[in-house]
Every structure is written in structure tokens, then in C-alpha cells.
Image: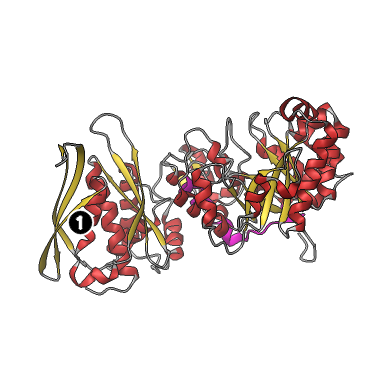
Amino acid sequence: MNSGTVRERLYLFDTTLRDGAQTQGVDFSVEDKRLIARLLDELGIDYVEGGWPGANPTDTAFFADVPALERATFTAFGMTKRVGRSAANDPGLAALLDTAAPALCLVGKCWDFHVDVALQVSLPENIAAIGDSIALLAERKREPLFDAEHFFDGYKANPAYALECVGAAYEAGARWVVLCDTNGGTLPHEISEIVTAVTQRIPGDHLGIHVHNDTENAVANSLAAVRAGVRQVQGTINGLGERCGNANLTAIIPSLMLKRDFAERFETGISPDRLKKLSRISHTLDEILNRAPNRHAAYVGASAFAHKGGLHVSAVQRDAKTYEHVAPETVGNQRRILVSDQAGKSNLIAELDAIGIAVDSKDPRLERLLEIVKEREFLGYSYDGAATSFEMLVRRLLGQVPDYFAVDSYRVWVERRHNAKGELITVSEATAKITVGGETLRSYEEGNGPINALDRALRKDLGQYSRFIDDLELVDYKVRILTGGTGAVTRVMIESRDGAGQRWFTVGVSENIVDASFEALYDSITYKLYRDGATA
């Protein structure tokens, strides 16, 4: 690309917190949604859709305290007004306008079949509802977006009416008119033809694309729509969504930024440095959902740049470009030579540099660290979503972390008993014997479950270090069973937070769930002491 070339801006709109929540087996907590919103903002996404205010208790609580985002425009989702009442008196629109979200996205029908059967109103009444709703949002100084539900099916059935619907939204002041392939059945060539036709009515810099993956074409459809004229792309991280999922932004974003046909024409709000965070953010989301990452996911999967055995390995080591369509480092991933120990050291140095640990490439401890990481990953540890435990592992090996305290012993027990009122209750208790500066401290605590009791006992009294952990709080706890049976190996992931709002993740692995939890808790406390400058 010539340095003087002016590229068009593409905008990225993430719907993980709403569409992603419709995935079977996914249930975001309020804290999950806050964390994910911050991760998306960190990546450089332009719009983060938070959900539908009032639709459920989680979204209501989430919108009651909107997360502070530095880059992204926080967006609320709702529907156009009901026919038979004015936009100003519609309770659904009122609920949206009561939020602090600067952008509001309204879904509306664009398929005449749905207007007749589902809404049971006249076709002109539906068009009027779309226009009046968007106009109200514009009048109230919010950025209006129109989500044209089932647009492609509607266009195939009645092109003139579908265009009238989206045209009404645009003419009423919609910043973005988003064309939706709601059932995911449209193919790339159809997307191209229909989007091209729509651009004759609405400028491309006001058009978005929102597709589902029911034919495994969501990424291809999104890219086809961009080539045909849209300038906003919607999707979810890791392709979360109902049925077969939504367009996968972890594949779309690097394709737009790294593939020449797109990179020469377009730019996004994501810098090359932020793109390097993509793999970590993808894996962190999987950890939040307590599920194994897709190893074979494009760009971000652990096997995306993995090479196995024979002449292929030698060829990769001589000329990786022959076998890798992009450099793995550009998306925060790494090359893996599955049958060789020759790969990994440079990646390890890069990871250490990223967390501020300077190590000479000839330091013999690097080889030992690489061996330890491989051994621990074999045992079940995963540092993709637990960067703090990785940092503690490295700093301990390098002798940078003092022995602040020693846990000589701990005990956790659960008792099912009748209380004084004769009610059957379950009580969780924990004790901890801790040595700090030569002094032995004993603590006892009860908790909401055995791990909460252990956490409270460990932090109850750390002597001279207590002041450093007064604001330490365990905010999330997830368990994954790595092997089957009653003696299964368990991985525990813990999220901690302090009074300044900083968060970090630690991991523990053991056949005993309490021991795994203890390991993650110990790392969390130690990290807080080290980060805040405690001295031994």
C-alpha cells in the first residue's frame, strides 16, 4: 500500500453480551459482562452492545451501572415502538432512553410476511413505527441504529418493501442501518448482490452487516458485505450466538487488517499492537465461560499455527511464510512445532517482555522455564486466561518474589446439621496456620461454601501484610474437570479484584479441588503483595 493512500474506515460492532448470551449453555453474570466489555474496549472495538435493558435481572443490573469504556461506544438494544401508541409514550423506548448508553439499537421487521403474521399490522404502519422510533432517538441526542431483522429473507420475498423499511430508518436519522441475515441461510453471492442493491438507496457508510453462521458462511458473508459496500461489521468474539453462532470477530478482524485486499482499502479502530491481544481475549472469554477453547479456531486457536513432524517441520523452520498465511505474532498467537523443543524460546521471551520482565536470551533459566511451562500445561495448567499465575511462576524462578508468608497447614470441612431452630443447614468452615516473619498466626472463618471459607481464613490475618490485602476480593471462581471419574484432575480459575478496580486471574490444578483452589488463592494474594510493593 502506498503511504499516501487514503483508506476507508470500517467500524466494528460487538454483540457478544447480547447475542453471545443466547448461546446454549452460556449464562453471563453481571461481573462477567463488565469484564468482557472492558476486554472489548481494550481490543479497540468501536461499539459494545451491552444487552436489552429490562429484559432480565442481569441486564437490568448491568445497565444500572454502565462500565466506563475508554474507546468503545456503549450501546443498548431494544425494539421499535408498538403500533397504536406514539414513540414518546412507548415504554420500551422509554426504558432505553433511561439508560446512560450513548447509542441505541432498535430491531424492527423488514419481511412483509412477519409484519402480516407476527405483528399483525399493516405494512405502512410498520414503516411508520420504524421511522418514528428512530426519529425520537435522534431527537433525544442518542446515536440511533436500526437492526433490520430478517432483511435478506424480506428482500428476497419483497424487495421494494424491505427497501422501504430500511429507507425509513435512514431518512429518520439512523446513523447505521444494519442488514441482518437472522436465520443464517443467505450465501455469499446473495449477500453481495443484495448489499450492492441496497447501496443504491442508502450510502455504504451508513450500512452495517449482521449475519448468523447456520451455513458456516458468517465470516465469508461479512467480508462479502464489506466488499459490496457496508462499512460496519457486527459479530461476537469466538462466534458465540444461538444455534450455530454469529459471525466470528476473531476471524473477521484479522482478515480485515492483515489480508491485502482489505488492508489496502480499509482501516479499523484497532492498531497492530492491539491486534496482538486478540488471542488472549479470545481465550479469556472461554475461561470466563468455563469451557475449553477451540484449538482449531482460525488465527487464535492453539493449533492455528501448529506444525507436526517430518519434512514439514524443517520447511517451517526455514521459511514459515510458506506454511503460515499470516505471522502468528500479529494476532498474539505463536508457532508450535509439536514434535520439537526448538520452538518456543523466542515466544517466551516476547511474553516476558510483554509483562515487563527483561531476560537475556542466553540466560540458562529460560530453558528451564520453558520446560516447566510445558510440564505444567501437560498437567492441565492454562495460562491463556491466568496471566498473573504465569507472571508469578516466572518471577519465582528468577528469584524476584519474596517469601512473604508460608501456609504451614490448612483445614476445610463441610457439615450438614440442624441448627437451634431445628432447620437443616450446611456449614462450611476453614482454619489456616500461617507463618509471617517468624510469627505463627492461626485463623478460623466460616463461608458460603468451603472455598469461600478457605479464602477468608487465608486473608484474615497476615500480620504485617494485612494492610496490603484489606481491599482484596475474590469476585469469580470457576472449576473445570479435566479428566473423568471421581479422582478427576480439576483446574480452578479465580478472578480477584482490589479497591482500585484492578483485576487479575490465577489458576490452580490438582486432583483435589480444594488444593487447586488453594494454589490459585495463594498466587492471588502473593501477586497483590508483590504488585503493591510489600517487602519481606
Mark 1 residue crowding within 10 angstroms, few (<14) / some (14–19) / many (20+): many
Asked whether residue 1 is in view, the answer is: yes
> Which residue is nearer to you in this view: 159 or 93?
93
Asked whether residue 229 is in view, the answer is: no
> Which residue is nearer to you in this view: 218 or 115?
115
Which span of residues is magenta-colored? 263-285
| x and y percentages locating residue 58 in the rendered image | 49, 46
* Residue at the image position 24 percent from the left and 39 percent from the top: 511
Indicate yes or no whether the magenta region holds residue 177. no
| x and y percentages locating residue 41 in the rendered image | 57, 58
* Residue at the image position 51 percent from the left and 38 percent from the top: 296
* Residue at the image position 28 percent from the left and 63 percent from the top: 526
Residue 458 higher or lower than 326, as above or below: below
Indicate yes or no whether the magenta region holds residue 280. yes
For disc 1, the marked residue is 457
Residue 39 higher or lower than 421, as above or below: below
Amino acid type indicated by mark 1: Ala
Label 1 sits on a secondary structure element that is helix
| x and y percentages locating residue 412 in the rendered image | 17, 47
Q: Is residue 73 left or right of residue 26?
A: right
What colouring style does the render use? secondary structure
Q: Is residue 110 left or right of residue 305?
A: right
**Quadrant including the N terminus:** bottom right
> Which residue is nearer to you in this view: 107 or 514?
107
Q: Is residue 32 left or right of residue 168?
A: left
**Quadrant including the C terminus:** bottom left
| x and y percentages locating residue 151 in the rendered image | 76, 35
> Which residue is nearer to you in this view: 468 or 140?
140
**Among the 4 quarters of the image, the one containing residue 178:** top right
Q: Is residue 399 left or right of residue 118?
A: left
